[in-house]
Structures are given as C-alpha cells and as structure tokens.
Image (cartoon, helix red, strand yellow):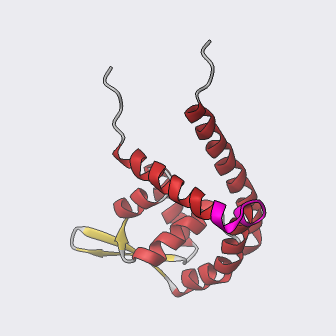
Amino acid sequence: MQQNTRGSLIWLRISRFTHQSNLLSNEFLKPFDLTTAQFDVLMQVSTYEPLTQGELAEKVTVSQGGISRMLARLEKDGLIARKQEWKTKTISLTKKGREKLENAFEAQLLFQSSFFDDCLSDEEQKTLYLLMSRVQKNSEKKKLPNK
C-alpha cells in the first residue's frame, strides 16, 4: 500500500478536528437547547433571511434530506417561519428564534474561538485563515477526475 501524501494527512487532520469540534460544540450548546447544525442553520437564516430552502442548503453542512427534517423541527419549535409567495417558499427567524440565537451566539463564538486562541498566536491564526480560505475556495472549483 502507498504511503499517505502530505495533502491526505492535512485532510485527515481537518476531518478529525471538525469531528471533535462538532462533538464538543454539541455538548457546549446543550444548555441552549441547540445542536451545532441547528446553530449553523439559525445563523445562516439570520444572516441571509429571507431565503429559500435551496439557498440555505448551499450554505450549511446539512444534507438536503437533513435540512428538510431540521426545518420542520425548527418550525415546530417556533424558531423559524416559512412563508409562501406564489411558487417561492422563504424561511425567516421568528422572534423566539432570534432570541434563542442571541442567547447562544456570544458563548458559542467564544467557545469556537478558543480552539484557536488556546494554541495559536494572532499571526498563526491569520495565516491559517488565509490558507484555509484559499483551500476552501479551490475546493468549490474542483471537478471530479474523468474515469
């Protein structure tokens, strides 16, 4: 078997970090009665509202089927509202959803930042941000190899 490449080792580290970060964030957000995915959805809705389910699905890390179930749950809990105008159904936060997000936002922001603040200097964080931005933008243009 072939040895891993540096790129594959970086990808593995990023995957493991993301998994561990999400596990810890889910525990951290329990007192706010939110999951990491729900927090992400509420943040995206808050930032871009009103938006369609398709637009939202492009912005979050939840599958199309998962987003449908999550939106149904968030709507049932009174955190979002869906409004239909002719053929377009849009999603917005309710007052309750906005309050829940505001309640969790600052604490989650500090918790997420602590992953980097605890072990990287400001300069290292800037460099990591620039490098990850470049990799992420490249991934958006990436095509699958021809078979």
Point out the residue furthest to the front here: 123
Q: Is residue 25 left or right of residue 41?
A: right
Number of labels in the image equals 0
Q: Is residue 81 in sight in this rendering?
A: no
Q: Which residue is rendered at x = 55% and y = 83% of the image?
A: 98
Please tell me which residue lies in front, 19 or 38. Answer: 19
Q: Where is residue 8 shown, x and y percent of the image?
A: 58, 32
Q: Which residue is rendered at x = 65% and y = 60% of the image?
A: 124
Q: Is residue 16 magenta?
A: no
Q: Which residues are magenta?
A: 116-124
| Quarter location, residue 31 | bottom right
* Residue 24 to residue 46: above or below: above
Q: Where is residue 51 shown, x and y percent of the image?
A: 36, 71
| Quarter location, residue 24 | bottom right
Point out the residue furthest to the top here: 1
* Residue 139 to residue 54: above or below: above
Q: Where is residue 52 shown, x and y percent of the image?
A: 34, 67
Point out the residue furthest to the left here: 86
Q: Is residue 113 left or right of residue 40?
A: right
Q: Where is residue 74 shown, x and y percent of the image?
A: 54, 69
Which part of the image, by quadrant, shows the N terminus?
top right
| Quarter location, residue 85 | bottom left
Q: Which residue is rendered at x = 62% and y = 43% of the image?
A: 15
* Residue 30 to residue 20: above or below: below
Q: Is residue 65 in sight in this rendering?
A: yes
Which part of the image, by quadrant, shows the C terminus?
top left
Q: Is residue 122 magenta?
A: yes
Q: Which residue is rendered at x = 43% and y = 61% of the image?
A: 59
Please tell me which residue lies in front, 42 or 82. Answer: 42
Q: Is residue 33 left or right of residue 44?
A: right
